[in-house]
Amino acid sequence: MAAPAEIPARAKIGFPSRPIINPVTNTVATTPTLILRNNPDRIYWLIVNLSPYDGYVGWDSQVSATRGLLLPANGGYASVSIVEDGELTIMEVYAINLTASGTWMIVEVERI
């Protein structure tokens, strides 16, 4: 069913977009795990650590407790927007859990 008026998000950014949930995986291991591929059409991403273990997210396969952003257990999150964070938005993203593998929710929004 078509929207009766222009979709507000489309009006704000000027082009259509779509959300993609867990485009690569929803499981983050105790070794660096690719969770988002390089995507020049990506305009936003949100990553939520749903696991009971602290984890880290970073922009290369060397992500670790000393080289990444902490995403605390049970709902820690990070988001990146092309408007505020520029090129970081389209780069590959890796994650790691410190204690055991766990479930994360990854959402990207891309231009279509």
Image (tube, grey):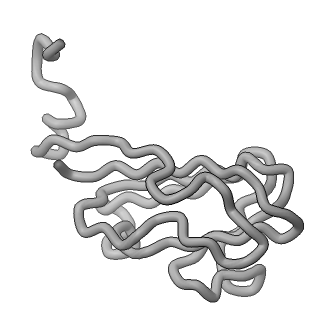
Q: How many marks?
A: 0
Tell me what residue is drawn at x 28 percent, y 52 percent: 110
Tell me what residue is drawn at x 47 percent, y 48 percent: 107
Name above or below for residue 5 compared with residue 112: above
Horizontal side of 58 relative to 50 (left or right) equals left
Name above or below for residue 40 compared with residue 19: below
Horizontal side of 86 relative to 99 (left or right) equals left
Q: Quadrant of residue 10?
A: top left
Q: Quadrant of residue 54?
A: bottom right
Name above or below for residue 92 compared with residue 103: below
Horizontal side of 66 relative to 8 (left or right) equals right
- Quarter of the image containing the N terminus? top left
Residue 62 in the image, given as x and y percentages of width and height: 63, 88
Residue 98 in the image, given as x and y percentages of width and height: 83, 71
Tell me what residue is drawn at x 44 percent, y 60 percent: 80
Residue 66 in the image, given as x and y percentages of width and height: 75, 86
Residue 82 in the image, given as x and y percentages of width and height: 31, 62
Name above or below for residue 71 compared with residue 109: below
Tell me what residue is drawn at x 22 percent, y 43 percent: 17
Q: Nearer the viewer, residue 36 or 87?
A: 36
Horizontal side of 35 relative to 55 (left or right) equals left
